[in-house]
Image (cartoon, rainbow, N blue to C red):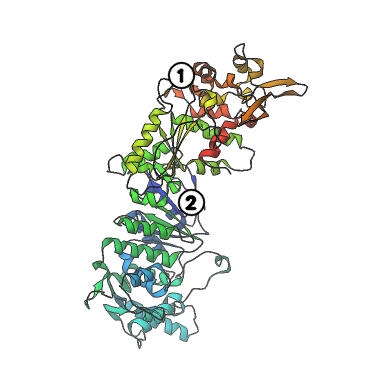
Amino acid sequence: MELTLAPNRLYQQSQTINLSKVTTLIGENGSGKSSILQSIFSQKLSQKEYIDKKIVCFSSGQNERFSNEFLRHIRRTNSDENNLQFSCFYFDKSWSRLLIFLATALKKNGKVREFLVSSGYADEVDGLDDTTALKIAFRLDSQYVKKVEDALSREAHGDIDTIRQTAFHRSLESFIENCINQRYDFDVPIKKEIFEIYPENLLDVSFDTERFEDSEESINRFDPEIGFFIRACNNSSFLDKEASSLVFKNKIDDKPLELGDLSDGEFQILFLHAIVDLFDSDDTLFIFDEADSHLHYENVKKFWDSLKQIKGNSISTTHLLDSIYCVGVENIRVLNKGKVHLPSNSNELIKRLSQLSNIKKSEFRALTYYEKIVLIDDLNDWYIFRELYKKSKQYSGVTNEYFDELFDKVAVVKVNSGWNTHNCKFAESKIGWVQNFTKFCEGLDIKTKEIFLLCDRDNLPIDGIGTEESPLKVQGIKISTGNMLKAHVLSWRRREIKHYLLSNSALGDCVVVLNNHKLPNAAHLQPFNNGDYLLEQCDNGYEILLETKEVKKGKEVTLKTKRVYNNYLASLPSDFVKNILSPFIEDVEEEPYGFSRDMFQEYISHIDHTEISEDITNMYNFIIGKL
C-alpha cells in the first residue's frame, strides 16, 4: 500500500511511503513520528486524501492533537444526525470498555472473544458471550423529547423529513427498546442512571443506516453500530462512557471481575484486539501511536502477530526493542526531522535501536534482529556495491525500490579486516568480531542466521579466492559458530571495491591514464567491457582471451579451456586507482571532505551497465540471493 504524506511541521515537503502490514516508525523524541501519523489522520478528516481508505487511530496515552481534531470533526457534523457511517475514528483508553464489549458481542470469531473464553473470563453458549456485561450511564434529556414531539406534529401535517426519520433516531429507538426500557415512548425524559447491557440485548438492536446520494455510495464506511455509539457518547448526550464498567466472569470466585482488575497487559491487548475485530477490512488503515506500551513481551508478540494477519494495513510508532524484534527490520522506517527514511543505512538504524536499549552491548542485541549481517571495512563500500548492482540491473525491468528493500534486510557493520600482509591471518579482526558476537548470542532468541565477512583482497593471491559455493569465497578459512549461525569469509577479486568503478564510459578521456604503459594492451579497459578478463583484438573489435590447461583428477588428465582473468587491472595499487577516481567521487573543496554520494551518483550515471564486473552480481547472489 502506498501513501502520499502531506508536509508536516518538521518537514515541509510531501513524501511517499510504501506500507506493509505492520510498517513501524522509530526515531528519537521530537523526530516527527507523531506528526506523520497526525498528518495522515488530518488529511482523511479533511477529505483531501485517502478517500478510498477507512482509517482508525489509537493512542495509548492522551494525545490531545488527535482527540481535539476528531471532536471538532464530530461537532462539525453534529447537525447531520443521519450520519452514522463514519470512515475515520480516533480512540483513546476511555473507549476501551465500550469497544471491548461491542467486539465480544458482535464478533463471535474475533480475537476478543477468543481471549476472554481461553482466559476463563467468559462463557460461550451457542456462539454468544453468555457472561460479559456492560454497565453504562444513559440518559435522554427533555430537549430531545421536545424534538420528538415537534417531529410528530410536523409529520401529522405531512412533513416526512424529521428527526424521527433519521438513522440515529431509529437506532436510538431500537437501542432503548432492547437495552433500556422496552415500553418507552419518548414522552418523558430518562434520568441518568446506570443500565446493564448484555450481548444478547445488543444483538437484538437494529442499527439503521442513512440514505446516501448516488455519488456517495462508493465512499468506504464502517458499519453503523460504532457510528451510533460515537454519536450517543458525544458530550455524554445519551451514553456516558466515562461512567461505565465492563464485568467478566470471575474464574476464581463469584465476585464480579471488572476490566480494571485485569493486568495492564491484558487490558491493553484486549483493547487492541477489539479495534482490529471491529474495524479490520481490506481498505482499513490502522494508525497506532505507541499502542504497544505497557505490554509484557508475550503480549507484544501476540499483538504484532495479530497485526500481521489483518486484511488491511497499519502504520505505528514504537519505543520498544521487543516490538522492533517482532515487527522485523524490513518493516521499520527511521524518522529524522519529519522525514521518513528507509533503513538503508543499517549503521544509522542500529544507532537508533541502541538508543532504545539499556542492556549491555546494545549494538549486538540490535543486530540480532537481522537475519543477515555483513562486516565490511568501510560503510561507503557497501553503498558503492549496492549502487553498482542496481546499475547493472537497470534494464532488467525490476525497480530500484525492489532492490533497496532487499538490501535493507541486511545489517552492515564497519569492522576492519586487520590484514594486508602474510604476517597475520586474513580477516582476523572480522573473525574476532564474529566470535564475540556468537558468545553474546548464547542463550538468546535471535533472528540472525548468517554473517558475511566481506574483505578487500589487498595482497591475497587470486588463486586463494573461489570455491564451489561461490567464486568470491576465500579458501581454507573456517569459523566456529556452533549450530546457531553460519559465517562466510568473502573477498573481492580486485584489490578493493573502488577498482570496480573503473569504467571506460564513465572515465571518458581520463581512461588514457589507466590504459597506460603499466598495463599490457590485453588488460586495457575497452568500451562495453567490464575488464574482468584479458582481451585480444579481432576483426569485430575485442574478444575474451582463452587459455587451455591440463586438469588432473586422480589419474585422469583432461584439457580445460577457460577465460584468462585480468589480474593486472585487479591488482592495480590502491593509491593509483584513488588518484584516478578522486576528482569524480570525492569532494576536496567543501566540508565534509572525502567521498560524496552526490558526486558518486553523477559518476555512476555514466557507467554503461555492460561495464560492471560479474563480481558484483556474484556477491549479490551469495549474500542476498538470486532473483
Residue reaching furthest to the right: 539
Badge 2 local density, few (<14 within 10 Å), some, or many (20+)? some
Give the SS element for disc 1.
loop
Q: Nearer the viewer, residue 363 or 303?
A: 363
Q: CA distance from mark 2 to mark 1?
A: 40 Å
Q: Quadrant of the C terminus?
A: top right
Badge 1 local density, few (<14 within 10 Å), some, or many (20+)? few
Looking at the rendered structure, the kind of residue marked 1 is Glu
Give the SS element for disc 2.
loop
Establish if 406 lies above or below 260. Answer: above
Q: Which residue is mark 1?
A: 589
Q: Which residue is mark 2?
A: 19
Q: Position of residue 208 (x, y in %)?
A: 46, 77
Quarter of the image where one finds residue 376: top left
Q: Which of the two marks, 2 or 1, is nearer to us in this view?
A: 2
Q: Position of residue 447 (x, y in %)?
A: 41, 47
Q: Visible in this render: residue 68?
A: no
Establish if 569 lies above or below 397. Answer: above
Disc ID at residue 6? none
Quarter of the image where one finds residue 71: bottom left
| Residue drawn at 59 percent across, 34 percent down | 391
Q: Visible in this render: residue 608?
A: yes
Residue reaching furthest to the bottom: 183
Task: Report the number of numbered marks.
Answer: 2
Compared across the picture, whether 145 is left or right of 83 comes to left
| Residue drawn at 70 percent across, 20 percent down | 536
